[in-house]
Image (cartoon, rainbow, N blue to C red):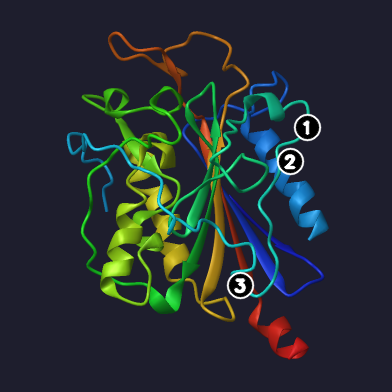
Amino acid sequence: NSRLLHRKRPTTIMVFGCCRSNDAVTESDGGLQGASTVSAFNRLFSTSGSNNNHNQTDDNPKQNDDNDVGYDCDFMGIHVPLPTFDDDTLAPHVLRKSGFDQGDGAWRRYIHYSVATNRERRQPICVALNIDQARLKTGTGRGAWREDDQVGREYQLNNDYYQNNDWDRGHLANRSNAAWGDTFQEAQRAADDTMVYTNACLQHANLNQDEWLQVENWVKTLEEDANDKISVFSGPLYSRRASSSSATQFLQPPGRPAAEIPAGFFKIVVFVDPEQHQQLA
């Protein structure tokens, strides 16, 4: 489903949702359900191919880099801030570290995007990505998946959770959408920087390689924006039955803690409306 919203400022917001089942989502259990995450966006905007490759991994964890500038709130020429997670439902579950210097320590910076992590679920709460369509580069290779040492391996699901099953490492900051820069080398480095487990959720292969991929491709080729610049917020939704031990809700590799499987995903696409932009000019 999609929903088109308009603000008084010259910005268009499109909201997409993809679910793996008919499970409802809720914020009632305080477990940082998708509905709670989307409610953070309500506050925010009221104020302002196959990805499977199960066996390709890298034993060299990602290290922090001064060039990982992260999501830029002023990227589109209009200020679109990161959502905050400061209410009683959300705050206890957000991973905060002193090395995370965006959003009061809640957001880890990468190239062109930033990630907020759920410390219990060990998957992203939300990923915020800037896309410069004019500088996108095609033909970038796919790097190896790796852990992020700055986040800590105890707060991310590694390849153990994606082997010999139907679950893909579902990118939230899409690799090809992040592959932009002034040179091909810059674009390749940005694409490689999406290949971290902190940027992935357990996502069924059928969804990852079909509906979710179609939405990501639509975003990349979007023509409704005024300046070739787009900001995208993506994240998981969870079932209200998440407290049960149903096999449809949890995945537990041998010798590893169980991980909760999202019931669906949201993607919020923000861009400058060309007609309103021209009127303001």
Q: Position of residue 265 (x, y in %)?
A: 52, 40
Q: Amino acid at mark 3?
A: Met
The residue positioned 52% from the left and 50% from the top of the image is 114
Among the two numbered marks 2 and 1 on one chain, the one whose residue lies closer to the N terminus: 2
Q: Quadrant of residue 226?
A: bottom right
- Report the residue marked by disc 2: 39
Which picture quadrant has residue 87? top right
Tell me the residue that label 3 is attached to: 76
Residue 37 picture location, percent across and down = 66, 38
Q: Residues within 10 Å of mark 2 (few under 14, many from 20)?
A: few
The alpha-carbon separation of the residues under discs 3 and 2 comes to: 23 Å
When the figure is inspected, residue 150 is found, relative to residue 74, above or below; the finding is: above
Q: Amino acid at mark 1?
A: Asp
Q: Is residue 188 above or below residue 99?
A: below
Q: Which mark is residue 173?
A: none
Q: CA distance from mark 3 to mark 1?
A: 28 Å
Query: Contact, CB < 8 Å: mark 3 with mark 1?
Result: no
Secondary element at image label 3: loop
- Asked whether 54 or 206 is in front, the reply is 54
Asked which secondary structure carries label 1, the reply is loop
Alpha carbons under labels 2 and 1: distance apart? 10 Å
* Image mark for residue 87: 1
